[in-house]
Image (cartoon, rainbow, N blue to C red):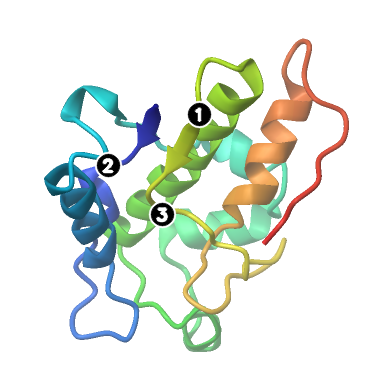
């Protein structure tokens, strides 16, 4: 089994209703239960800004990259902006891309401990989701040579 996970998913956002430590706890539980071993784990790279631009507008990505979020943007996102937050969520998107690539390639069952950021829109983040990782992964796979054409997303 291939399990995609990174310690970078744990982001210090202070006392918050969205505890990013949950990813670390799931990982630790899977290890302790013997479901996975450290050798099963793939540490993903952050999604590139070009990959994110397959789904999100350049204006929005500029705000996220450079920290020019308005108070309204932050209220809608429901997360405090920081470089660490942006990089952590870019890494989660990269994890979804990596898991999707492995699943499509048929290498093995692929699971991702992270992601599921389905509330983000093209021009804004919402509900603790700065980027839409599933949509980005689909667009990346469609862009690749011998890429997929159609996808069904089941939530």
1 or 2: tag closer to the N-terminus: 2
Residue extending furthest toward the top: 145
Does 46 appear above or below 24?
above
Does 128 appear above or below 37?
below
* Labels 1, 3: front one: 1
Residue 100 % position (x, y): 59, 33
Does 10 appear above or below 19?
above
Residue occupying the point 54% across, 39% down: 49
Residue occupying the point 65% across, 44% down: 136
Residue 23 % position (x, y): 28, 58
Point out which mark residue 19 bears: none
Residue 84 % position (x, y): 27, 56
Asked whether 31 or 119 is in front, the reply is: 31
Residue hosting label 1: 109
* Labels 3, 2: front one: 2
Residue extending furthest toward the left: 32
How busy is the neighbourhood of tag 1: few (under 14 within 10 Å), some, or many (20 plus)? few
How busy is the neighbourhood of tag 2: few (under 14 within 10 Å), some, or many (20 plus)? many
Q: Are marks 1 and 2 in contact (CB under 8 Å)?
A: no
Residue hosting label 3: 89
Q: CA distance from mark 1 to mark 3?
A: 23 Å
Question: SS of the residue at dot 1?
Answer: loop
Number of marks drawn: 3
| Left or right: 75 as drawn, with respect to 105 | left
1 or 3: tag closer to the N-terminus: 3
Q: CA distance from mark 3 to mark 2?
A: 11 Å
Residue hosting label 2: 6
Question: SS of the residue at dot 2?
Answer: loop
| Left or right: 12 as drawn, with respect to 79 | left
């Amino acid at each position: 089994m291939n399990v995609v996970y990174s310690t970078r998913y744990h982001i210090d956002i202070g006392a918050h209703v969205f505890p990013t430590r949950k990813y670390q706890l799931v990982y630790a539980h899977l290890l302790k239960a013997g479901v996975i071993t450290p050798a099963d784990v793939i540490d993903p790279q952050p999604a590139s800004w070009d990959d994110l631009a397959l789904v999100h507008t350049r204006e929005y990505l500029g705000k996220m990259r450079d920290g020019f979020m308005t108070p309204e943007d932050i209220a809608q996102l429901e997360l405090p902006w920081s470089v660490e937050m942006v990089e952590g969520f870019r890494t989660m998107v990269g994890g979804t891309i990596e898991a999707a690539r492995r699943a499509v390639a048929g290498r093995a069952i692929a699971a991702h401990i992270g992601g599921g950021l389905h509330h983000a829109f093209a021009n804004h983040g919402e509900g603790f989701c700065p980027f839409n990782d599933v949509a980005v992964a689909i667009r990346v796979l469609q862009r690749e040579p011998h890429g997929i054409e159609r996808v069904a997303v089941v939530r």
